[in-house]
């Protein structure tokens, strides 16, 4: 199965969300879960590290995690293909990660100085 892809222009705000659903479509209660999202390059160098302290917002009852990274941070990334996933640590200690997603940073033409 191919790795999912997401494209964004360098310097644009990046917003992505994850929804956790039961097989019947009801949301998973994420109360007490701890989330962590990292973006890494092909050489496994850490480029962005996001937690609830700096960009993750958890709507536990509705099973949703939103990630927001500013344009200023995204401007620091080289134009290339990078990779990210979201890791969830449940109160029981169980750790699960989302699928790995390609984050393709494209060249931006307009760059106000």
Image (cartoon, helix red, strand yellow):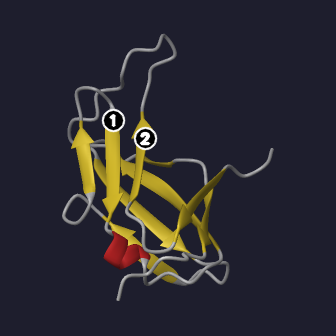
Location of the N terminus (image quadrant): top right
2 w.r.t. 8: above or below: above
The residue pinned by badge 2 equals 18
Q: Which callout, 2 or 1, points at the residue further toward the start of the chain?
A: 2
User: Where's the C terminus, which quadrant?
Assistant: bottom left
Residue drawn at 36 percent across, 77 percent down: 73
What is the crowding at mark 1: few (fewer than 14 residues within 10 Å), some, or many (at least 20)? some
Query: Is residue 22 toward the left or the right of residue 27 in the image?
Result: right
Give residue 7's quadrant in the image: bottom right
Q: Nearer the viewer, residue 92 or 61?
A: 61
Query: Between residues 57 and 7, which one lies in front from this camera angle?
Result: 7
Q: Could you tell me if the residues under marks 2 and 1 are in contact, i.e. CB atoms within 8 Å? A: yes
Q: Residue at x 43, y 81 (%)?
A: 111
- Please say if 87 is above or below 32: below
Tell me the SS state at disc 2. Answer: strand
56 in relation to 32, above or below: below
Q: Position of residue 64 (x, y in %)?
A: 33, 35
Work out whether residue 3 or residue 106 is closer to the camera in this orientation and state it: 106
The residue most toward the bottom is 113
Residue 110: x and y in percent read: 48, 76
Q: CA distance from mark 2 to mark 1?
A: 6 Å
Q: Residue at x 50, y 81 (%)?
A: 77
């Amino acid at each position: 199965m191919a790795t999912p892809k997401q494209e964004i222009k360098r310097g644009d705000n990046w917003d992505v969300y994850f929804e956790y659903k039961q097989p019947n479509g009801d949301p998973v209660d994420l109360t007490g879960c701890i989330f962590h999202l990292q973006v890494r390059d092909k050489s496994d160098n850490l480029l962005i590290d996001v937690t609830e302290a700096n960009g993750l917002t958890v709507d536990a009852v509705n099973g949703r995690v939103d990630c927001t990274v500013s344009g200023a941070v995204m401007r620091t990334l080289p134009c290339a293909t990078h990779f990210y996933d979201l890791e969830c640590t449940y109160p029981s200690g169980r750790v699960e990660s989302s699928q790995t997603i390609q984050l393709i940073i494209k060249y931006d033409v307009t760059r106000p100085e």
